[in-house]
Amino acid sequence: MNQMTKTFIVSLFLSIIFIFPAQAWQLKPFETTYTATISNIPFDGQATYSLTKKANEWHFQTLASMAIAQRVENSSFVLKNGAIQPSFYKFEQSGIRSKEVSLTFDWKKMFAKGHFKDRKHDDDMFFDLKHHMLDQLSTQLALQIDIANGKKQMTYQVIEDDELDTYKFKVLGEETIETPVGNLVAVKVQRVRDANSKRQSYIWFAKDWNYTVVRLYHLEKNGQEYVISLAHGNVDGKEIKGK
């Protein structure tokens, strides 16, 4: 093979790389159902998470139902340069402690209008927006996107109820966890809190299933433990199955 031929082959190879770039990770629709335990006691109820897309807008919903209460969260957003840009958020809780929170994001005027209602409040609120600011629910998907793209530490500005908060997370590594659908390889993520905080939170994202959440652990300051575990689900129409 002469030098001219070698040069031609290298040039052709480089051309193919630029014409057909590596496939970037993409958010995909999913629907997952979870069961819960509180301090190792099975909880009477379940939660369903669903992500759908219509045109360019995504809709993320969680529905948790139990004997004494029901909780529904909705977040609508678009993706701007791969990042979530919320347009609307609503939280509704009925039962022994009723509560409503709604947020409307205006990215042209750079403010969000919120309404917060419970037994003691019925107030409107306004927040100055900063780029990449999120609502509580869309934070889970922002984590999913960032972990899939290889980030190890993440910080988000989040509108939580009637105030602004900063959520920090870090990737701890990979684990194989047992679930009702089989063993799944998952990326374990910790929520980083103040050094003196007794609260702990960990989330596991299934590596082979588009980094969908498969387990969530939370320890309250009173020592009570909450575990939410995947019961079944699908990603982009494919049933989640472990090894």
Image: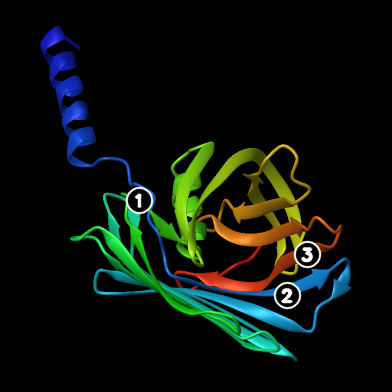
Residue that mark 2 sits on: 35
Q: CA distance from mark 3 to mark 2?
A: 11 Å
Q: Mark 1 vs mark 2: which is more N-terminal?
A: 2
Image position, residue 75 (x, y; %): 42, 72
In this view of the protein, can residue 222 be seen by the observer? yes
Kind of residue indicated by mark 1? His
Q: Mark 1 vs mark 3: which is more N-terminal?
A: 1
User: Is 182 in front, or is 232?
Assistant: 232
Image position, residue 165 (x, y; %): 51, 52
Give the quadrant of residue 36.
Answer: bottom right
Q: Residue at x 51, y 67 (%)?
A: 161
Residue 96 as seen in the image, left or right of residue 100: right
Q: Residue at x 49, y 53 (%)?
A: 144
Residue depth check, mark 1 versus mark 2: number of the one nearer the observer? 1
Asked if labels 3 and 1 touch by Cβ distance under 8 angstroms, the answer is: no
Residue that mark 1 sits on: 132
User: Is 194 in front, or is 89?
Assistant: 194
Give the quadrant of residue 69.
Answer: bottom right
Residue that mark 3 sits on: 226
Mark 3 residue element: strand
Image position, residue 6 (x, y; %): 18, 15
Q: Relative to residue 219, is residue 56 depicted above or below?
A: below
Q: Could you tell me which quadrant the C terminus lies in?
A: bottom right
Number of the label disc, if any, that sits on residue 66: none
